[in-house]
Image: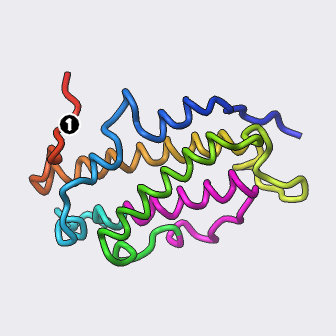
Amino acid sequence: MNTLYKVDDRSLLASVLNGEGVFLGPAKLLDGLTADQASTKPHQLPHSIADIVAHLCYWQEWWNRCAVGGYAGVPQHAADSWPGGGAGDWNELRTRYLDSIEEAKRIAARSDSLNDPILPPDVPNPVLSKESRGSGLLHAAVHNSHHLGQIITLRQLLGLWPPPAGSMTW
């Protein structure tokens, strides 16, 4: 058996999910966007902000399920984790994504199994073989930060940066 990545610091997980001290938090970053703005694809880019948020929501909810119940299966193709058209109403999607982050923080705060493996012993998956439930939540936060950076760039291209609450400055 592989040695699992151990991430059981509940405060660290909540901090990284919020972007504390590293990047503007997801709620502030997504604030002030209309449905039309969120669905725009500038410069023939393949994804809109809404598309990216739907993708983030898909994977955050997936990691949350894994952190609670263990392995939840993976999509057969990467495209399966990119719901088309932003997956519906922008305000509902934004709320659903932000709720999934809050749920991840609740899971981290109350879980006694953050160091348990995600994979059951009979499921061979080399990509997830070292993942504990806590490291899965951390990987979700890192995945989020990657795509939230893309959203910042899209907002800049659309002339919608900074968001209403402002941005981090140095």
Q: Residue at x 51, y 67 (%)?
A: 81
Front position in the image: 160 or 25: 25
Q: Quadrant of residue 149?
A: top left
Q: Is residue 115 above or below residue 38?
A: above
Q: Quadrant of the C terminus?
A: top left
Residue 148 is situated, as x and y percent measured from the top left of the image, at: 35, 48
Residue 144 is situated, as x and y percent measured from the top left of the image, at: 44, 48
20 sits to left or right of 113:
left
Q: Quadrant of the N terminus?
A: top right
Residue 147 part of the magenta segment: no
Query: Is residue 160 visible to us here?
Result: yes
Q: Which residues are magenta?
A: 53-80
- What residue sits right under mark 1 in the picture? 167
Q: Quadrant of residue 116?
A: top right
Q: Residue at x 9, y 53 (%)?
A: 159
Q: Is residue 1 above or below residue 75?
A: above
Q: Residue at x 23, y 31 (%)?
A: 168
Residue 29 is situated, as x and y percent measured from the top left of the image, at: 27, 47
Q: Amino acid at mark 1?
A: Ser
Magenta highlight: main SS: helix
Front position in the image: 62 or 105: 105
Residue 53 is situated, as x and y percent measured from the top left of the image, at: 38, 61
Q: Secondary structure at mark 1?
A: loop
164 sits to left or right of 69:
left
